[in-house]
Amino acid sequence: MTATTQSPTRIEPTAEEPRPRRPRAHPFTTVNPASRLFVLAVMSLFALYFLLPVWWLVVSATKRSGEIFSGNGFWFGEHFALVRNIQTLFEAQGGIYSRWLLNSLLYAVGGGIVSTLLASMCGYALAKFPFPGREAVFGTVLAAVLLPAPVLAIPLYLVFSYTGTINTFWAVFIPSIVSPFGVYLSRIYAASSIPDALVESGRLDGAGELRIFAMCVRLMAPAMVTIFLFQFVAIWTNFLLPSLMLADTSLQPVTVGLVGWRELQGYPISYTTVVTGALVSVVPVVAMFVSLQSFWSKGLVTGAVK
């Protein structure tokens, strides 16, 4: 009977455990407290600069006609007359203010929807369709983004005057559906959020380009909402183009109508009525931004990162 011998077990050297790495400090936490305080002070001044006119507007809309230019302009008067001022606003000149609000909604909502659709289609095409001169077209779009809108006001007036469409709905609506910034944002967002494999698989399955674009619309929803909001605000607050194109008060938006009231020098329309109209005209814009906040913030972040 033979005895078996076992070789001693070889002990492998243990690898040295990696040392835990220290977490990096956030850049903002390493800033000098004095510098941080200076930045916060500057930001507070900018916020105050933008909020003070809004506060004055809210306070002035609650005053009577004789109180708006007397006493402290940034505090409420003796009588809270907001409800009465709103009633007077919608009764002035046969209720023309309601017509101005409706016109602004038609221009802004209709122009925003059409502009968003056209811009998203153009941006999608620039991102997913390779064709000669694509970068040159995109460069032209970027140049159009940098072009100030007032530069085109007189040429547009001459074009619509030649076609005989001055003082019509289309003289304001057609220029409102063009958004170079929307094309730019759509191109950036489509390139980053729509996989090429999705487009190619749709083509292999026999789907047409419009069908493929319809499938990609869901992926582009944040960018499209952002484009709509920016175009909505731009059309709603536009004054120069409607004032040039429209002489009929029944076609004017609320911006042009309020300036017309302001030029009456307080008679027969009081300054309080004009201020109340300005406050009411801000409500749709604020409501639109608040209701679609989650979409447009995501679209802006994606565009900024790219």
Image: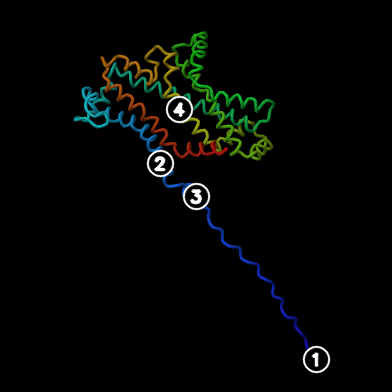
Type of the residue with mark 2: Leu
Q: Is residue 107 visible?
A: yes
Say if mark 2 contacts mark 4, CB within 8 Å.
no
Q: Is residue 14 above or below residue 109?
A: below
At 54% from the left and 37% from the top, the residue drawn is: 304
Look at mark 4 in the image and give the residue it sits on: 232
Q: Where, quadrant-wise, is the N terminus in this rendering?
A: bottom right
43 or 257, which lies in front?
43
At 61% from the left and 26% from the top, the residue drawn is: 139
Q: Nearer the viewer, mark 3 or mark 1?
A: 3
124 or 275, which lies in front?
275
Lower sequence index among marks 3 and 1: 1
Look at mark 3 in the image and give the residue it sits on: 26
Q: CA distance from mark 3 to mark 1?
A: 73 Å
How many labels sit on residues? 4
Type of the residue with mark 4: Phe
Type of the residue with mark 3: His
Q: Nearer the viewer, mark 2 or mark 4?
A: 2
Asked whether, in this view, residue 40 is left or right of residue 184, the answer is left
Q: CA distance from mark 1 to mark 2?
A: 90 Å
Of all residues, the one furthest to the left in this rendering is 78
Badge 2 density bin: few <14, some 14–19, many ≥20, Cα 10 Å: few
Q: CA distance from mark 4 to mark 1?
A: 99 Å
Look at mark 2 in the image and give the residue it sits on: 40
SS at mark 3 in the image: loop
On the image, the x and y values in percent for residue 289 come to: 42, 34
Lower sequence index among marks 4 and 1: 1
Q: Nearer the viewer, mark 3 or mark 4?
A: 3
Look at mark 1 in the image and give the residue it sits on: 1
Badge 1 density bin: few <14, some 14–19, many ≥20, Cα 10 Å: few
On the image, the x and y values in percent for residue 261 come to: 32, 17
